[in-house]
Image (cartoon, helix red, strand yellow):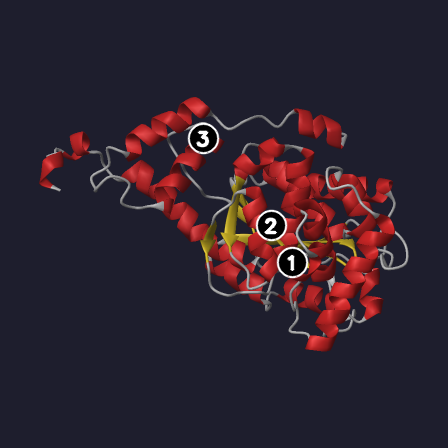
Amino acid sequence: MKVEEILSKIVPINEEIYKQANQRTSKLIMPYRAMGYLNDISEQLCAIYSSMSLKIENKAVFVMAADHGVAEEDVSAYPQQVTCEMIKAFIKGNATITVLARLNNCSTIVADVGTKCDLSEKEPIGQNQFIIKKVKNGTNNFAKQPAMTKEEAYNSILTGFKIADEYITSKKLNLIATGDMGIANTTAASAVGACITKNNVELITGRGTLITDDTLENKIAIIKKSLNLHNPSPNDPIDVLSKVGGLEIGAIAGVILAACYNKIPVVIDGLISTAGALLAYKLNPLTKQYMFAGHLSYEPGHSLMLSYLGLRPILQLDMRLGEGSGAVLAMPIIEAAAKIITQVATFDEAQVTKSSL
């Protein structure tokens, strides 16, 4: 299947069901829309599933991992080998995302889509699965040349789609989240975000792994230099991805497309995942209808990206980890919204006089 075919099969969420959900919300035994944003979430869920009977049972977070050539420019506080070391922690199940995923009965699928690691696929450990689907062994240093070819960018999106689509189908997943791993990926994500949202690089670029003032100044300069060097077109997501993106960012866009294609909701994590969401949105604006923003990252660029997409974060905990941590933490709130609209009675059902509240 080609990306173009996938995009053509993404349809709007069910407007008629959305209206029915909205009508039910207004009749629940509580003051009008007393659950605030949870009411909005529940209505969107109904429209995504095309059903008033919501049952979220099978969940997974897809952690896409890749390395970045721009790490050569000293834009991160950590060396590139940390990417491989963190993947091992994911496999063992003692990284933050795997702990949070277990807490929420959520499977973790870690995919090496472009690292420099020499790892072999492991048997699942608990709920964790590790697979290798490399598009290439890390991107090029985009401060000197395009991060990848357009074909590689295209393939990274298609790879993410295929990984997620297979699991969604075989495991009957009905709620997924996006995650990431890759040293220097906040540099790539900030470059993608600055290009697409047309915000100043200084506004959108943060400290990532808590870099120093000097390193932050260098990081901003590298992103500016790269955008001026390659001049990616903001309205051409493949062009942006190929010139200043990352393989895992492309794969995350593919994961999002898989959720939309299969008509299930996808919870977006922080800065890197939202860069992937920007790409998915530019490929097909309907994808936004299937997205939930799990949280608002401490990274300054994240709020600007979410504002561009028109997504409201569910949580705001000053987190800046990535991995899918904020997205998975938001899953119980999404599940709560589903329970509210399906299990809370209406005034008529409960035989409660509306004027008594």
Q: Which residue is mark 1?
A: 204
Please report whichever mark, 1 or 2, sits nearer to the chain's N-terminal start. Answer: 1
- Do we see residue 118 in this rendering? no
Q: Which residue is mark 2?
A: 305
Sequence order check: which comes first, mark 2 or mark 3? 3
Please name the residue shown 55% across and 60% down the image: 297
Residue at 84% x, 61% y is 69
Q: Residue at x 42, y 22 (%)?
A: 16
- Figure quadrant of residue 201: bottom right
Q: In front of the other: label 2 or label 3?
A: 2
Residue 79 in the image, given as x and y percentages of width and height: 77, 73
Where on the picture, by quarter, is residue 157?
A: top right
Q: Is 206 situated left or right of 149 in this image?
A: left
The correct choice, above or below, for 54 with respect to 305 in the image is above
Q: Is residue 197 visible?
A: yes
Q: Secondary structure at mark 2?
A: helix
- Secondary structure beneath disc 1? helix
Image vertical order of residue 199 relative to residue 340, above or below: below
Q: Which residue is mark 3?
A: 47
Which sits earlier in the primary sequence, circle 3 or circle 1?
Answer: 3
266 sits left or right of 140 in the view: left
